[in-house]
Image (cartoon, rainbow, N blue to C red):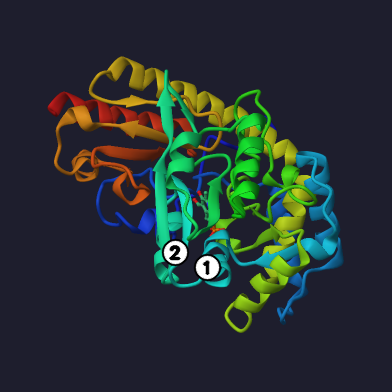
């Protein structure tokens, strides 16, 4: 291994969202989606060089960053994107919220599939528009989009479909046929397709990610595809993301809604993004090996713990979705915290009480300790 995935600097006292939540308590944070690993050495070195320059004025997208991004989309995701189709943003969450303001009027609504990353459910509400949700289907351990339920749910008020691609929290990489069918569905009902692809370079199995961009353009739905280096390369704190909006009018409407609210990306964000997309792939390959091993380890643990908890095979992301309803705890997240493990509660994802999400993007030593504590919790239940 060229990179170190066995140690992580102590993150306490660094303003880490993940580690601050349980500060002062003996609780291992296995919740919010960032990883307890150093970012690629190449990125750290490039940030140091940028800091050495010493001037940090307002920054526009550097030409070399845009070129690296266009090349990345082509090489990794088969998307041929013109530079002017890219919109830089400080994050996917603000982009989602601006999209709801830009494209939905009061009385109109977005549609999405649950369980899902909570900001998908709050963004329409914050924008004062409606939301309709449809449960993902689950059969023999495989999650899917329930198109019959979508057809039943869609109405003339529905103007947008928000897709999590790959899917957080269930870790599903939807097959190309599913994305094609969804594009067809959006086209048929004249829905804007928002495709959140932040986890697209964290595919752990030998299955291809299909970008929503594949079906954008002539004969396809209007599409906003959203990307960032933040999950893959552990750069969330640099606040740099990019959207691809191929349709000029859609892009104009989106950018107008963001005017005066969203400022320039910070200078370090561009450096981190460009360096990761150009030079981060050897690190990413090693990371995928580590995450696969952690996932397999966790899945074995859960298999031994059945029926008190169960999980689903994670094809992508470093997040596992756990069904702990059998434990019969009124507050299962608090129950695990009381046993020293901090998980994300499932309710904000649109799930019934009793589900939790576990982040296994950490050293094996940390995961082992978390599982040891969880085993103790299960014994006490
Ligand atoms: C599906 C998904 N979208 C977006 C985000 C966060 O995006 P950002 O930090 O760019 O706002 C996350 C973080 O966990 C996520 O899982």
Instruction: Estimate the x, y position of residue 163 in percent, counting from the top left.
Output: 55, 47
**Tag 2 residue:** 124
> Which residue is drawn at the image coordinates 35% and 17% (left, top)?
303
> Which residue is drawn at the image coordinates 77% and 47% (left, top)?
219
Comparing labels 2 and 1, the label whose residue is closer to the camera: 1
Residue found farthest to the top: 304
Residue 15 is at least partly visible in this image: no
Q: Residues at badges 2 and 1 in contact (C-beta under 8 Å)?
A: yes
Establish if 35 lies above or below 228. above
Disc 2 is placed on an element classified as helix
Q: Is mark 1 within 8 Å of ligand 1?
A: no
In this image, 127 relative to 330: left or right? right
In this image, 319 relative to 247: left or right? left
Instruction: Estimate the x, y position of residue 363 in percent, counting from the top left.
Output: 48, 35
Gap between marks 2 and 1 measured at Cα: 8 Å
**Tag 1 residue:** 104
Find residue 338 and report its image quarter: top left
Residue 235 is at least partly visible in this image: yes
Establish if 53 lies above or below 239. below
Instruction: Estimate the x, y position of residue 223 in percent, counting from the top left.
Output: 67, 54
Instruction: Estimate the x, y position of residue 271 in percent, counting from the top left.
Output: 74, 62
> Which residue is drawn at the image coordinates 58% and 42% (left, top)?
165
Mark closer to the chain start, 2 or 1 = 1
Disc 1 is placed on an element classified as loop
Of 264 and 221, nearer the camera is 221
């Amino acid at each position: 291994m060229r990179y170190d995935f066995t140690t992580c600097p102590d993150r306490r006292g660094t303003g880490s969202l993940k580690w601050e939540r349980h500060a002062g308590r003996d609780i291992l944070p296995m919740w919010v989606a960032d990883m307890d690993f150093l970012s690629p050495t190449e990125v750290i070195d490039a940030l140091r060089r940028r800091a050495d320059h010493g001037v940090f004025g307002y920054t526009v997208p550097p030409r070399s960053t845009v070129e690296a991004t266009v090349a990345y989309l082509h090489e990794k995701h088969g998307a041929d994107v013109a530079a002017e189709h890219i919109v830089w943003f400080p994050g996917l969450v603000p982009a989602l919220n601006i999209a709801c303001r830009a494209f939905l009027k009061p009385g109109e609504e977005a549609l999405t599939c649950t369980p899902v990353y909570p900001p998908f459910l709050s963004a329409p509400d914050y924008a004062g528009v409606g939301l309709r949700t449809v449960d993902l289907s689950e059969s023999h351990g495989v999650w899917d989009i329930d198109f019959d339920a979508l057809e039943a749910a869609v109405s003339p008020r529905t103007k947008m479909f928000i897709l999590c691609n790959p899917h957080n929290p269930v870790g599903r990489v939807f097959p190309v046929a599913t994305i094609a069918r969804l594009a067809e569905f959006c086209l048929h009902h004249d829905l804007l397709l928002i495709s959140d692809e932040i986890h697209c370079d964290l595919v752990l199995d030998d299955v291809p990610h299909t970008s929503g961009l594949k079906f954008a353009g002539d004969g396809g739905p209007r599409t906003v595809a959203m990307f960032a280096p933040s999950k893959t390369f552990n750069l969330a704190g640099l606040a740099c993301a990019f959207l691809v909006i191929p349709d000029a009018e859609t892009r104009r409407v989106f950018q107008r809604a963001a005017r005066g609210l969203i400022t320039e990306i910070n200078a370090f964000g561009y450096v981190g993004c460009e360096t990761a997309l150009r030079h981060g792939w050897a690190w990413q390959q090693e990371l995928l090996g580590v995450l696969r091993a952690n996932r397999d380890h966790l899945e074995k643990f859960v298999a031994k713990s059945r029926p008190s908890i169960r999980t689903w095979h994670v094809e992508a992301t470093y997040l596992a979705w756990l069904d702990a309803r059998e434990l019969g705890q009124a507050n299962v997240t608090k129950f695990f915290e009381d046993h020293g493990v901090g998980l994300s509660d499932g309710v904000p994802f649109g799930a019934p009480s009793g589900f939790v999400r576990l982040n296994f993007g950490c050293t094996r030593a940390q995961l082992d300790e978390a599982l040891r504590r969880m085993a103790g919790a299960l014994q006490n239940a």
